[in-house]
Image: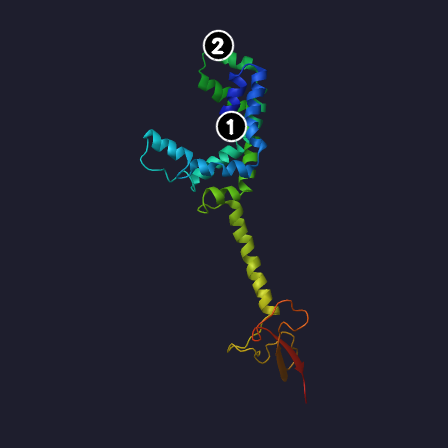
């Protein structure tokens, strides 16, 4: 779509003033936030949205189309709306540098419009296509909000997969650290620790006393049930 828009602006709009005016029209929606432009598709594509109501009113369908919203189709529509301009601008700049006499010579030689586009315009626009592709791919790979919102949580993105991979081990590591430095409960479920299981014990443990930590203990901001945590003191008697 970005290639077609740029081709139309460069080769079909002869006036430079009209080119600038149409280009500005394309940029007007981008003056608003991406989130607002993305959420605006929800009332349009919803089950009772404008598009479904228009189809039912015209008699084209009998029931609302369910695949329009909260699906991969909705994600694609939102991405095309959000990131098309990032393809149009670099391709437009590349096509604007093409000498128009090359196209006229190709037409005079009997080349069809398709051959002119395939053998002249497309090769000379490769730099703009590559640059626009880098922009779009980078933006899509760094996004998770559009996929989560427009698909209703049914589709996954690169960012969500990375969050799962990176966030999983950190959570489990934090739990292991809390187990190592925190609770040391008796295997039977009581508040007293099992012999030799207190975290600060060194050497042979002869005697251990366990006092529950409650809200009265200094340094504690929230009350703790008496059987949940223990503070062990060691003494080695002869």
Residue sitting at x 34%, y 29%: 58
Q: Which residue is mark 1?
A: 2
Local secondary structure at mark 1: helix
Image coordinates for residue 221, horizontal then vertical, percent: 64, 67
- Counting every numbered tag in the picture gives 2
* Vertical placement of residue 113 versus 44, above or below: above
User: What residue is rendered at 50% in x and 39% in y?
Assistant: 39
Separation of residues labelled 2 and 1 (CA atoms): 28 Å
137 lies left or right of 61: right
Packing grade of label 1 (10 A; few <14, some 14-19, many >=20) is: some
Query: Between disc 2 and disc 1, whose residue precedes?
Result: 1
SS at badge 2: helix
Q: What residue is drawn where x is 57% and y is 20%?
A: 21
Nearer to the camera, 125 or 215:
215
Q: 115 or 7, which lies in front?
A: 7
Q: Position of residue 77 (x, y in %)?
A: 46, 35
């Amino acid at each position: 779509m970005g290639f077609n828009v740029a081709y139309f602006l460069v080769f079909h709009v002869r006036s430079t003033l009209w080119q600038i005016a149409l280009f500005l029209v394309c940029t007007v929606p981008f003056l608003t936030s991406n989130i607002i432009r993305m959420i605006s598709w929800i009332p349009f594509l919803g089950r009772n949205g404008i598009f479904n109501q228009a189809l039912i009113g015209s008699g084209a369908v009998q029931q609302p189309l369910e695949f329009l919203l909260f699906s991969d189709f909705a994600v694609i529509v939102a991405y095309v709306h959000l990131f098309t301009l990032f393809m149009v601008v670099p391709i437009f700049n590349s096509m604007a540098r093409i000498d128009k006499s090359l196209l006229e010579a190709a037409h005079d030689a009997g080349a069809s419009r398709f051959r002119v586009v395939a053998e002249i315009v497309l090769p000379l626009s490769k730099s703009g296509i590559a640059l626009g592709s880098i922009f779009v791919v980078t933006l899509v790979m760094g996004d998770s909000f559009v996929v989560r919102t427009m698909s209703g949580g049914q589709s996954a993105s690169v960012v969500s997969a990375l969050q799962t991979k990176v966030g999983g081990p950190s959570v489990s590591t934090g739990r292991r650290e809390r187990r190592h430095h925190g609770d040391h409960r008796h295997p039977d479920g009581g508040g007293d620790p099992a012999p030799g299981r207190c975290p600060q014990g060194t050497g042979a443990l002869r005697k251990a006393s366990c006092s529950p930590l409650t809200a009265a203990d200094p340094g504690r901001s929230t009350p703790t049930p008496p059987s949940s945590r223990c503070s062990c003191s060691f003494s080695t008697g002869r």
